[in-house]
Image (spheres, coloured by chain):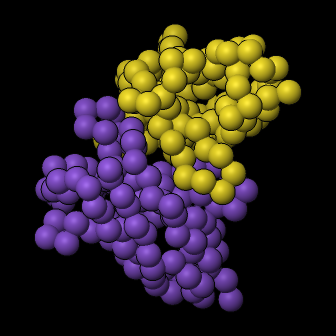
Chain colours: A purple, B yellow
Amino acid sequence: EVQLLESGGGLVQPGGSLRLSCKFSGLTFDNFAFGWVRQAPGKGLDWVSAINPGGDFTPHADSVKGRFTMSRDNSKNTLYLQMDGLRTEDTAIYYCAKDLPGSGWSFDSWGQGTLVTVSS
Amino acid sequence: QSALTQPPSASGSPGQSVTISCSGTSSDVGGYNFVSWYQQHPGKAPKLMIYEVNKRPSGVPDRFSGSKSGNTASLTVSGLQTEDEADYYCSSYGGINNLKVFGTGTKVTVL
């Protein structure tokens, strides 16, 4: 069974930085692509970023481009989301998710989410 | 990156069917057969229910079905059960620069 465990969320001031981690177990990590999706309180889902198995394709949503960077360490079965220049509108639960290969970026396994609060 | 348009709410009695629409453009829903649907219960992570317009992951009941016509996709839940009460989000591949677009979400209530 695939398991995903996010960590790294918390309270940060506007302009600050955080690094989220997502550790996977139960699969051959480097065979798969992954993504981050966020959900602001009481709002809908919002795609943030994605990464291919090799780590050389990392598209990001326009709303975070230039501020957030997704990466992976295949030796540690772990994804990362480096978030710099945080804004109040980045406040959300951040989910990491596994891509279903060949499905056009459908995510078939999700973590429990980690809450990021950007506030002064 | 405009969100796909869904009705805010839908409802039905147990045993009935409910259909949720998801309206996009030729750059997302209409341009690719990569529409997916997610179910989300309060306080829980989303769950994939449909991918590639009409395919169901293992373990998803066949009461859930998907379709697409032009720029609009639909999710139908037949034989409604109380556990189907949740928020539902559509999503589509939107091309290499707009990889994944989500819908606005629909709250399904089982009366």
Residue A118 x, y percent position in the rendering: 62, 79
The residue depicted at 63 percent of the width and 20 percent of the height is: B77
Q: Nearer the viewer, residue A63 or B8?
A: B8
- Relative to residue A66, is residue A9 drawn left or right? right
**Is A3 placed above or below A91 here?**
above
- Residue A12 is situated, as x and y percent measured from the top left of the image, at 57, 86
- Above or below — where is A72 with respect to A38? below
Q: Residue at x 25, y 32 (%)?
A: A102
Q: Residue at x 17, y 53 (%)?
A: A28
Numbered disc total:
0
Q: Is residue B56 visible?
A: yes
* Residue B9 visible in the picture: no
x and y percentages locating residue B90 in the rendered image: 55, 33
Q: Residue furthest top?
A: B69
Left or right: B2 in relation to A53: right
Q: Which residue is drawn at 62% across and 77% down?
A: A117
Q: Is residue B36 above or below residue B62?
A: below
**Residue B42 appears at what percent x and percent y?**
69, 51
Res B8 quadrant in image: top right
**Viewport quadrant of the C terminus of chain B:** top right
